[in-house]
Image (spheres, grey):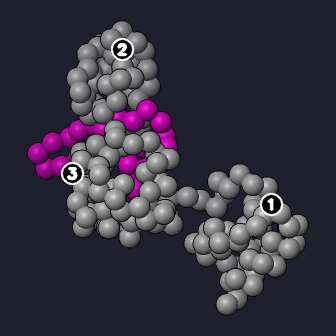
C-alpha cells in the first residue's frame, strides 16, 4: 500500500493532482485544489483503493484527514469518492463534532449524503472518533486515568466526562462525581 507520495505538483484539476516523483507521475484523487501550485513540492498522504476494474489513490493533506477518511469508508454504503467529497467540504474537526453531537443536518448538507446515510454515519462512528487521551484539561485527563484503573471502558469514560459538569472542584471530587454517575 502506498502511504504517502512526496514530489512536485506537475498538474492539477478540481478533483485530482498529478505528482511527479523522480520522473513518475502519480494521479491522485485530491479534493483540495486551493492548496496546490504547479511546481511546488509537497507530501500527500494516500489511501490506495483496489477494485476489480480500477486501482486508485486518494490523497489527504494530513494524517488526521486520512484517519477520518478510513473511518468514513468503513460505514456501510459510503465509498471513497463520497468520503473524500465530505472531507473537501468541511474540516476534520467540524465533521467529528457533527458526528459526536449527532448533528444529522450538518452531515446531510454534505454532497451525496442523504438522511439514511447521515444516520448510518452517526450510528457507526459516534464515540469512535474522539479518544479520551485527546482531552486537554489536566483534571479531566486525571479523572480519565483513574476511571481506566477502575476498569471502565473508553466509551463509558467519554460519556461521563461529557456529563461531568462543573470542573472547578478538585480532581478527587471530579472522580467521585464521575463514579457516582457511572454507578447509577
In the image, what residue occupies the spot 70% across and 88% down?
183
Q: Quadrant of residue 159?
A: bottom right
Q: CA distance from mark 3 to mark 2?
A: 28 Å
Identify the image quadrant of the N terminus: top left
Q: In the orientation shown, which residue stands out farthest toward the bottom?
A: 184
Q: Position of residue 99 (x, y in %)?
A: 43, 60
Label 3 secondary element = loop
- Residue 32, position as x, y percentages in the image: 34, 30
Mark 2 or mark 1: whose residue is earlier in sequence: 2
Q: Which residues are magenta?
A: 48-74
Say if 104 sits above or below 151 in the image: above
Q: Circle 1 sits on which residue?
A: 139
Q: Is residue 65 magenta?
A: yes
The picture places residue 9, in percent across and down from the top left corner, at 34, 16
Q: Identify the residue position indicated by label 3 in the image.
A: 112
| Mark 3 → mark 1, Cα distance in angstroms | 41 Å
Mark 1 nearby-residue class (10 Å; few <14, some 14–19, many ≥20): some
Amino acid at each position: 500500500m502506498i502511504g504517502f507520495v512526496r514530489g512536485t505538483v506537475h498538474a492539477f484539476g478540481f478533483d485530482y493532482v498529478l505528482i511527479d516523483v523522480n520522473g513518475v507521475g502519480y494521479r491522485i484523487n485530491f479534493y483540495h485544489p486551493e492548496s496546490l501550485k504547479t511546481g511546488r513540492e509537497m507530501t500527500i498522504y494516500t489511501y490506495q483503493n483496489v477494485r476489480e476494474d480500477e486501482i486508485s489513490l486518494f490523497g489527504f493533506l494530513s494524517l488526521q484527514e486520512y484517519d477520518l477518511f478510513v473511518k468514513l469508508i468503513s460505514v456501510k454504503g459510503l465509498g471513497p469518492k463520497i468520503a473524500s467529497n465530505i472531507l473537501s467540504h468541511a474540516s476534520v474537526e467540524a465533521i467529528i463534532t457533527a458526528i459526536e453531537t449527532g448533528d444529522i443536518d450538518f452531515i446531510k448538507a454534505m454532497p451525496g449524503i442523504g438522511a439514511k446515510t447521515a444516520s448510518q454515519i452517526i450510528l457507526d462512528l459516534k464515540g469512535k472518533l474522539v479518544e479520551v487521551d485527546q482531552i486537554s484539561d489536566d483534571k479531566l485527563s486525571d479523572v480519565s486515568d483513574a476511571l481506566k484503573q477502575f476498569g471502565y471502558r473508553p466509551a463509558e469514560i467519554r460519556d461521563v466526562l461529557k456529563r461531568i459538569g462543573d470542573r472547578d472542584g478538585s480532581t478527587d471530587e471530579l472522580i467521585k462525581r464521575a463514579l457516582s454517575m457511572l454507578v447509577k
